[in-house]
Amino acid sequence: MDLDDADLKTCRRLDPASSAYWEQAYRMGTPPWETGTPAEALVRVVRDKLVPRGTVLEIGCGSGADAIFLARNGFEVTAVDVSAIAIERARLRAELENCLPRFVLADIFRFAPTAGQFDLVYDAGFYHYIRQTNLSGFLDVLWQVTRPGSYYLTVAGATGETAEGGPPQVSADDLHYELARLFELVELRPCRIASPLRKEGYLGWSCLMRRPILRNAITG
């Protein structure tokens, strides 16, 4: 069962920074960010080989469509979500599709992988929520799990379109300002964020960034 506007209003009474918010959304049915297919922006980035195959951390993986897509395309995937229901659905789906990303039930702020472990960090919708409550903590996480040369790809709601029930919106200027503290911009492109609530989806950003590679100056 898909969640309708009334269900979403019930969820919004909870704090999006808490696990209870996300668990409630999955307990009530299929949240509007769950389409069962990988994000358009992620598919394009992989198809166009904008990031090399390697280790990936997906933050807020939901029921696993993006993580499974990445694993099928040769990436070594660790996918994290705070919702036990979402992780259970993701593991079941991966087993049925004979594809095994590593799904982890964890709060990303308490998740402790090896420092600098990931070549790519990816989220579709986590950044545009967490920036409202704990941007500095999220930047700390990104710094911990990446290393010079690592990529960060986020899919976020974009300003410039008025639509009921859509994701939180971020301007291009705010997105660049907030993330440029850690990363250099590779590309920023408009995209569509699919949702069962709206046939044409919602306007979004596909933002790909890279952590700078430090080069020691050579002096003669």
Image (tube, rainbow, N blue to C red):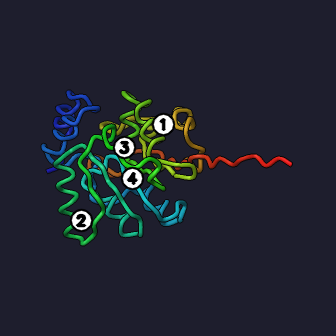
> SS class of the residue under badge 1?
loop
> SS class of the residue under badge 4?
strand
The alpha-carbon separation of the residues under discs 2 and 1 comes to 36 Å
Viewer-nearest of discs 1 and 3: 3
State the residue lying farthest toward the front: 220
Amino acid residing under circle 4: Leu
Mark 4 lies on residue: 57
Residue 125: which disc?
A: 3
Viewer-nearest of discs 4 and 3: 4
> SS class of the residue under badge 3?
loop
Q: Mark 2: give few (<14), some (14-19) or many (20+) Cα within 10 Å.
A: many
In this rendering, would 83 be left or right of 180? left
Q: Which residue is at 83% across, 47% downward?
A: 219
Q: Which residue is at 28% across, 69% downward?
A: 99
Viewer-nearest of discs 2 and 1: 2
The alpha-carbon separation of the residues under discs 4 and 1 comes to 30 Å
Viewer-nearest of discs 4 and 1: 4
Amino acid residing under circle 2: Ala
In this rendering, would 129 be left or right of 86? right
Mark 1 lies on residue: 160
Mark 2 lies on residue: 94
The alpha-carbon separation of the residues under discs 4 and 3 comes to 14 Å
Marks 1 and 3: CB-CB under 8 Å? no
